[in-house]
Image (spheres, coloured by chain):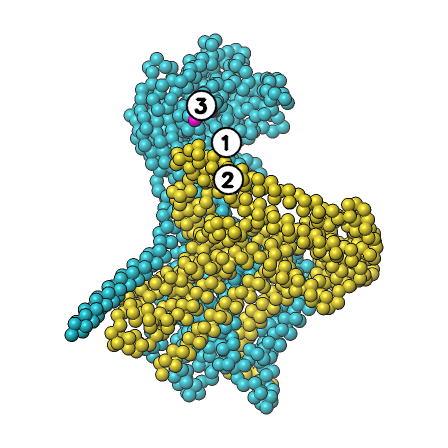
Amino acid sequence: MKSAADSLAATDARRRLRTLKDLVIRHGVTVGGIGVIVAIVLIFFYLLLVVLPLFEPAEMHLATDYALPTDDARTVHLSTEEQAEIAARYLANGELVFFRTADGEPVARENLLPGGARVSAAGISDLAGDGVVLGLNDGRILPTRVEYAISYPDNQRHLEPGIVYPLGSDPIVVDAQGRAIIAVSGRINDNAARFVSVLEDGDVVLTEVALETHFLSGETTIAEATNQSLDVRVGRNELPAFVLMDPLQEWIYLVAESGDAAVLRREAGEFVINERLRLVENGRRVTALRFLTGGISLLVGTDRGRILQWFPVRDDNNDYRLQQIRSFEGPDSPVTDIASEHRRKGFLVGHANGVLGVHYTTSERTLIERKIADAPLARIAISPRANSFLVATADNRMQLWSIDNDHPEISWSALWGKVWYESYPEPEYIWQSSSASSDFEPKFSLAPLSFGTLKAAFYAMLVAMPLAIMGAIFTAYFMTPSLRTMVKPTVEIMEALPTVILGFLAGLWLAPLMEQSLAAIFLLLLLLPIGILATGFAWSRLPSSVRHIVPAGWEPVLLVLPILLVGWLCFAMNGWVENTFFNGNLPQWISNELGIGYDQRNALVVGVAMGFAVIPNIFSIAEDAVFGVPRHLSDGSLALGATPWQTLVRVVLPTASPGIFSGVMIGFGRAVGETMIVLMATGNTPIMDMNIFEGMRTLSANIAVEMGESELGSSHYRVLFLAALVLFLFTFLFNTAAEVIRQRLRRKYSAI
Amino acid sequence: MSNEKTLKTWWKSGSPWVWLNAAAVTLSMIAVIGLLALIAVRGLAHFWAPDVYEFRYEEADGEIVTLYGSIRDTEQVTAARLRQAGMQLDDVESEFVDRHLIKMGNRDQLGSDFRFIVEPRIIERSTPTDIVMVERTEWGDQTGFLREVLENSEVIARGAEAWPEFEQRIARVVELREKINELESDEIGAINYTLEQLRLEERHLELEGELTDARLAELESRRAELDERYQLLLQDLNALYEKINRDSYVMEVQGGIDVELPLARVVRAYQPNAMGFFGKLGFWFEKLWEFVSEEPREANTEGGVFPAIFGTVVMVMLMSVFVTPFGVIAAVYLKEYARQGAVTRIIRIAVNNLAGVPSIVYGVFGLGFFVYFLGGNIDQLFYPEASPSPVFGTPGLLWSSLTLALLTLPVVIVATEEGLSRIPRSLREGSYALGATKAETLWRTVLPMASPAMMTGLILAVARAAGEVAPLMLVGVVKLAPSLPIDGNAPFVHLDRKFMHLGFHIYDVGFQSPNVEAARPLVYATALLLVAIIIILNLAAVRIRNRLREKYRALEN
C-alpha cells in the first residue's frame, strides 16, 4: 500500500513539474516571440531616432552675463578663439583687450595705436574673422590679426593670445590729407594685399600692397604700396557707409545706407564698375552688411529687421549680376550686427530691440528668434565651432551663450525643393554632399535621388511587367503540368540569383555589348514579336498530323529555336544596319544627330538587368493568382463555347487581376530598393533626366556609396538615414498594400 | 478558304496572344539559362591555358612588330567605329573588321597586359611550341622565350636545356616560398598577435591602476621571451630568403629584349603550345584547385579566393546560429501561443513584408545600431585599453552576421510557420488525449515534424545571406582582410575582425580593381562559384519542401 501511495505522490510531483515546465515554456516562448517582433519594429524606430534630430529646432542657453568696465571705449570688433574660452575686443581708442569669456576678466591688453589715433572703422580681412583691418580717424589703416598659441603644460590646455601685424605694426597711409576713414575692407593673400577705404567725405581709396615672401624664412615684406582714388558714385552721390571686398580681391561692394550700391570688379588689374543697383526697397535703409562665409553672398540687414541674401549670378550675356536670392523676416527693428558662421552658411543677427535671430541660408530656416536684452545688440561674435557666441549690448554688457544647432542646413525645402545654391545660375535640385573645400555649401536635395530611383524602377518595370505577367498567364493557364514543374523551379532560381552577379554582368558584359550592338537590340524589339507571331501562324497551318506530335501547352518549347534564330539574325545584322543607316556607330549617331547624351552604363542596361531581377517576384505572385482561379469558372465559360483565350480575358483575368496587381506592386517595391544592380550598372551620377541612354543615382546606391565616409552624427549621416527611412517606408507600404490585396483575393477564391 | 481569311480567323481566335504569352515564358527561360551558361562558360574558361600566338603585326604607322599573346575575345566591329576611335584603316576595304583582344602579359615591360589588334593587319601568326608563360608574384604574367637559367649570377643552362632546369628550380622555389609563408604568417603572426595582447594587457592594468612593478616585470619578461623567439625565427627567415633568391632566369620578351628576373618571383611556368589536350586538362584542374584553395595575389586579380569562401562560410554559419532559434521561437509564438486575431494577422503581414524591405536599409540599421551604438558602448565598457582604436565599434564579422540574421529572420519565421500550420490537428489532439501538456506536444510531436520546414527556411536564409552584398558593405566586409576570422590564436574565433566575402569580391574586383580587364575572368569564376553555391542551396530547399509536402499528404490520408 505504501508503495502505491509513494508512486501516487511521485506522479503528483511529476505532474506538478510538468505543469511548471509547460508554464515556463509558455512564458518563455511568449517573451521570446514578442521580443523578436519588437526587435523587428525597432529597426523602424531606430532609423526614426537617428533622423529626428535633423528637424529639431536649435536651442540656446545663456552661460554668463556681465557688465563691461565702464571706462572702456566703444567696441568696434569682437571675435573669439576656436572654443570661445577667450575673446578679443577691439576698442575705438585703439586698444585690443583679450578677455575670458566666462567672466569678462581681461587676460591681456595691448595698445595698437601708440600715436593716439582713434579707430573709426573695422573690417574683417580673413575668413576666420581673426584678421581685422582697422581704419583710423587720421586717414591710415592698420591690418592686424589675433593668434592663440596653444600649449599643454601639466596636461592643461593653455591659450596665450597675441597680436600679429601681417604688414608691419606701422599703419599704412591711405589718405595723405588725413581724412578720417569711415569704412574699410581688405584681404591679404600670399603675394598681394588690397584694401578699400571710404573717407569721411565719401571718397573711395584703393590701397594695393605687393608682397614678397622670403623663400627661406617665409617672412613677408612689403614690396610696394600704392593708393589710388576710385572714381565711383553710389546712388545720387551718397556716402557709401559700407564696403566689402571678396577673398579673391576681385569684387568690391560699396553700399550706401539708402541701399544704393555700386559693384566693382577687377578686370586686367583695374577695378571697374560692374553694375549699380539698389539692394533694398524704396524707403528702407541698410543698417548692416556682411559676407556669408566663403565671401560670395552678401547679407544685407535693413532698418525693418529683414535680412536679404544677394550673390552674383551669371546672366544670359555671361555677365555677373547681383541677384536677391532670398530674404529672412526679422522683428520690426533695425539690424545692428550680423555674424556669419565660420564653416557653414548660417548667420546670427542682432536687432536694435535686443532680439537675436539665428538663420541658415541654404535651408531658408529661421532657427531661433529670441529677445535676449533690452538694449540694442551692438556686436555679435560666433565661435568658429558655432557652438557658442558672444553678444556685446549697447548698454555695455556682455553675454555668453551656448547654442545647440547641429543640423540647420536641413529643412523640408532643402531636401525636396529647388534651392538656389551659391554660384548657380538658378534654383536647382542637386545632390552633392561633400567637397574638398571647407566653406563648401552641402547640397542635400533628395529629389534627384528619388527621381533616379523611380527612373530605374520605371525602366525595370517596363522590361519586367510584360514578360512576367504574360509568362505567368501562360504558365498558369495554358502550360502542360509537366512543363510547369520545370518552369517554376527555374523561376525560383532566377529569384535567388544574387543581385551582385546580375549587376556585375550588367556593368561588365551587357553594357559594352549594348553599346556595340545597340542596333541589334532595337531590331530585336521589332523583329521578335513578328517572328513569334509568324511561327505561331505557320504552326497553325501545318498538317494536323505534325501538330499533334506536340500537344497544346508546349508552345514555349516550340518557340525556343525561332527566338534564338531571330536573336542571332538581329545581332548578325547589327553591323549592316549601323553602316547603312547610322554612319557605322549608333551610339555616336544618337548623341550627334539626335542630341541625346549616351552613356555606356545607362538606364536601358539597368532596366534589363533589374527587370530580370524583378521578373520572378511578379511572376510567382501573378502565377499563383491566375492558377488559383477556381476551375469551375473557366470550365463554365469554355462549356458555353468561348475559346480559351476569350475565357482567359473575360473570366480568369478579371478575377485574378488584383493578384497580378499585387505582384506588380511587390516587383516595384523590389526595384525601388535594389542596390547592387544600379550601383554597378550605372555611372551613379545624380542627374534628373528621363533619357533612357543616361544613368542615374538611386537612393539605395547613394547610401552604399556614401555611408562609409559620412561622419557619425553629422547632417550627411542623418540624411542618409533619412534616405533609408524613406526606402523602408516606401517598400513597407507598397508590400503591405500588396499583401492585403492578396489576402482579400484568397478569401474571395475560397468563397467562390 | 483563302490564306487571308485563315489569317483573320487565326488572329480573331486569340491564338496570337497565346503565342506571345508562350514567348514570354521562353524568353525568361532563355535569359536564365543563357545567363547561367554565360557565367559557367566564362568562369570555367578562366582556368584553361589558351594557345599563345606569335603575331607579326603591322601597326597603324606601318611599323612591323612581333607580338606574343593569346586571343581572349574576338568581335566584329564596323570599320566606321574604329575610324571614329582614331584608328587608321585607309588601306582596309571591307566595312567590317574582326578585332581581337589579346593578352600579352609583360606588364612590367609594356605598361599594359592587353591590347586590341585588328585582323587585316596581322601579317602572320604562328604557335611556337617553346613559348613560355610565367605566372609571377607581381606584374602579372610574362610571355616570351626562356633563354638562360642562372645560379648566383652564373649561367647553369642555356637554350633547350634551360626549360627542364627551369621547371626543377621553380619546384624548389615554390617549396621555399611555402615555408617562408608559414613562418611569416603563422609563427611570426602569432608572436605579433601575442605582443599586441601583451600591450593591451599592460594598458588595461595601467587604466585599472594595478600596474605594479612585479606585474610590469612579468610582462617584460614575457615580452623578452617573445622577442628572443622572434629573433630566432627571423634568422630562419633570412636564411630562407637567401636560398630563394639564389636563382634567376633570362627571358626574351616582346621586342627582342632580354629580361633577367629572380626566380623567387615565379609562381608557375608552362609552355601552353607544347601541352596536349590532357596536359591542358591537368593544368585546368590545377588552376581550379588554386582558385578555391589559395589566397588572392596582385590586388585580388590573380590567385584564389579562399579567404572569401572562408569568410562567407563563417559569416553564414554565425548568422544561422543567431537566426534559427529566434526565428523558430517567433514562429512558434505566432502560431501556437498567440491568440489568433487581428493583431497576429497584422504582425504576420509586417513580418512578411520585412522580407521585401531593401537590404541596404538593414545595412544602414546595422551600421548605426550594431556598430556605432552597441559596438561603441561595448568598447567603452570592456575594451578601454584598446582606445582609440575600436574593437567592436567598427564593422566586423559579428555585426555582419547579426545584420544578416535580422535580414533573414522573416524567411525563417514564414517557413517555420508554414511548416507548423501544415501539421494536421489530429496529431496534436492525439497527443493531448494521451495527457501531454502543450509544451510536451510541441517538443515531442510538433517541432520534430516541422523540422524539415525549419530546415527549408534556414537553407533559404543561408542562400539569401550568401548572395547579399549591399548591407555587408556597410557592416564588415573588406576587399582584403589581413587575417582570417578563425585562426590558431586564442580565442580562435575573432568576431571583431573584418572578413572577405564572395559577393563583395565580385563587386570589388570587377569594379574597383586597377586592372579590370585582367581581373574579369576571375570575376566570372567567382560568380560561377557563388551561383553554384546558391543554386545548390536553393535546390536542396526545394527538394526538402517537396518531400515534406508528400509526407503530410500521406499523413492526412
Residue A241 disc label:
none
For mark 2, what is the residue?
B222
Magenta segment includes A154:
yes
In-image side of A524 versus A184 (left or right) = right
For mark 1, what is the residue?
A295
Alpha carbon of mark 2 to alpha carbon of mark 1: how far?
Answer: 61 Å
Q: Chain of mark 2?
A: B
Q: Chain of mark 1?
A: A
Q: Residue at x 53, y 13 (%)?
A: A170
Alpha carbon of mark 2 to alpha carbon of mark 3: how far?
Answer: 35 Å
Q: Are marks 2 and 3 in contact (CB under 8 Å)?
A: no
Does residue B208 lie above or below B186 as drawn?
above
For mark 3, what is the residue?
A153
Nearer to us in this view, A115 or B512: B512
The mark lying in front, picked from 2 and 1, is: 2
Chain with yellow colouring: B
Magenta segment includes A517:
no
Q: Report the magenta residues as a range.
A: A150-155
The mark lying in front, picked from 2 and 3, is: 2
Disc 2 marks a residue whose amino acid type is Arg
Disc 3 marks a residue whose amino acid type is Pro
Image quadrant containing the C terminus of chain A:
bottom left
